[in-house]
Amino acid sequence: MVNALRQSMSLLIVLIGMALFAQAEAAGLMVVDEAVVVKKGTNIEIRVQFNELIQSMGYSRGSVGSRFYIDLRRNRLTNPIELPEQVVNVSSDSDALVKMITYSEDGDGFGRLDISLSRVYEMSLEMSPDLRELVITLVQPSNQMSATPAQEELAKELMSKARRELIDTRDFKAALSLYQRVLGLPPNTKSQDALEYLGLVHERMGEREEAIRVYDHYLNNYPEGDGADRVSQRRISLITATEVQKQRRRESTPVAESSNLQVYGSVSQYYYRNNYTVNDETQLTASLLATNADILARYRTDHSESLTRFSGGYAHNLLEQDKDRSTYVSAAYADYHDEDIGLEGRVGRQNSSRDGVLGRFDGIRVAYDITKKSQVAFVAGYPVNTSYEGLDTDRKFTGISMNFGPYWDAWEFSLYGLNQTANDLTDRQAVGGEVRYFDPSLSVVSLLDYDVFFDEINIGLLLVTWNLTDSTTMNATADVRKLPILTTQNSLQGQITLDFQAILSTSDLQNFYSDKEIYQLAKDRSAESHSLSLGISHAFNSRYRMSSDVNVFNISSTTESGGVLAQPASGNQYFVNTQIIGTGIISEADITHVGARWSQSQSASSQGVYAGSRFLLNKQWRLSTRLAVDQVQWTFIEKKQLRYSPKVRVEYHKSRFQSDLEFGSQFSNSELADDSEQSWSLFTVLGVRLEF
């Protein structure tokens, strides 16, 4: 029994090393693709785009008012992978409003967006009907006076100076600056007048469109009263004059199209190290240096947008027994979207979870809007298993899809067909689609992927999000799928040559089996998983919120064939996780969570508690701490294990520079019938990141 345990621990050491090496690969599988900040009238929208299906579970506001924490549940269409914290690249035309957006997972089934703004806003959330984009709308906070007496006195003095500059000296630029200073103070008794006069100054300077924008802002915040009547009249006069001027320009000379070019992104370098100790015997299991660059160039005109992106780098394994350097490319594509003609396209290495494509590929996707409510899309390319691969033309696919809606302001539909080959074999022939229903209180997404060649359902998925009240949200998921996704490529699992070398391609496998036998091997290696989960999030007030998640999961058995042993069914596995999230508990700007979890399977049961906090030490330094304690009891062997998992992360931010240092460990004490064992692992992450 002890030898078996030691063998299992040796396997764990290998898995830990593989997991740390996968950190670089995980950088290419980030949940968030990018975030785009745009002005929408007097409001501002942050559009966070995802590479996977996402459900929102509510949000908490930081006590400082300019920080938000949004809890998410992601529903993977591909195999899961543990992800490091992601700092999201942001494209913004809103004066550096967003200081930082990060996505992180705490290992307890929950993901979290941490959004830090430069100013205080009210916020509302809305997921897109296809659950692939989160729209965060920011609104100026309600006009409650919060200025101190000293600030009120300063506002009065600034208004007096601004009036002299506006009327007496007619120095409009000086007046503009003074009114902006008043508006930069906390809401005060002069804020309303300052906003009206700010629009008037823009009007006197001949900046009509900017004056209209300011007047719109005024009417949105102060819709009643004499001031609203005056501003409304000025706004109407300006719009009329502006339209007349535009018409004259159209009649005389062509209007020059405005354009904007943004080049932004980040470069980073991180070092990962892991030591594993069993009974005072230590082994270095991972030592990895990962360097990554994510560079984007976005060109906008009045009617179109072009984007080119490269994200990749290299991972240098520093272990003596395996020194090598692996280059990886996570994304490398050019993207074009023309709103006038309804055409969009992307070519290169990209990620997708639509059109029957289930992950990264090298290829092209082109979509055309036939009408306002119908779109046809064509996709073709070569699947990519990992970002370390180059272009592999042995497997290829083509597909077509149709997208319809929205109808009745609530329903959308998608249908697709996709054919994928592996050399001269059929790899996957899928038909399927999505049905989506969306309104402010309820959203439903259903997805079916059926393989007509293998005559099997690959994925059947139902996602429901129900906003019971403004403070309570429920999520439910029903998921049936092949694990792994059924393709002829699955037939390679466990296959070796006579000299015990792994068979890596289906063309090599054809030297040993007929095509019919290969297809059967693929089916035999593909188990079926069933998952049912229910989650609820409730905000007790602006500072405290609870999230809870219940999941039942099982995997079917596989069939013995081709020299590969059958895998038994897992039986039902149960998981329960509940956490309380609070803000402003330890310091003025922190988020703290405390939780408990329980699981039960055929082979083991476990229960544990965990707690963590992330808070600002000052404007540049941020500290995150976490501690989890779990007890595991195995069913078929007399073994108990108590695990302690502490983690500390220190971050330094200065302008566009970031540096991270993270220490984590796991201490385990295992008790057997006739022996005991102590083990612990220590991992270290050190990195720097520079935005531009």
Image (cartoon, grey):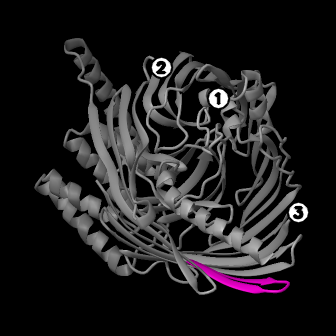
Helix, strand or loop for the magenta stretch, by majority: strand
Residue 573 spot, x, y in % from top left = 84, 59
Mark closer to the chain start, 2 or 1: 2
On the picture, is 88 further left or further right than 159? right
Question: Which residue is disc 1 drawn over?
Answer: 356
Label of residue 602 in the image: 3
Question: Which residue is disc 2 drawn over?
Answer: 342
Q: To which quarter of the image does residue 668 belong?
A: bottom right
Say which of 200 and 109 sits in front.
109
Residue 598 spot, x, y in % from top left = 80, 70
The amino acid type found where label 2 is placed reads Gly
Disc 3 crowd rating (10 Å Cα; few below 14, some 14-19, many 20+) is some
The amino acid type found where label 1 is placed reads Gly
On the picture, is 136 further left or further right than 432? left
Task: Please determine whether, in this image, residue 261 is positioned above or below residue 323.
Answer: above
Q: Quarter holding the N terminus?
A: bottom right
**Residue 222 seen in render:** no
Image: magenta residue range = 665-681
**Residue pictured at 13% horizontal, 52% vertical:** 170
Q: To which quarter of the image does residue 457 belong?
A: top right
Task: Please determine whether, in this image, residue 348 is positioned above or below residue 198.
Answer: above
Label of residue 182 in the image: none
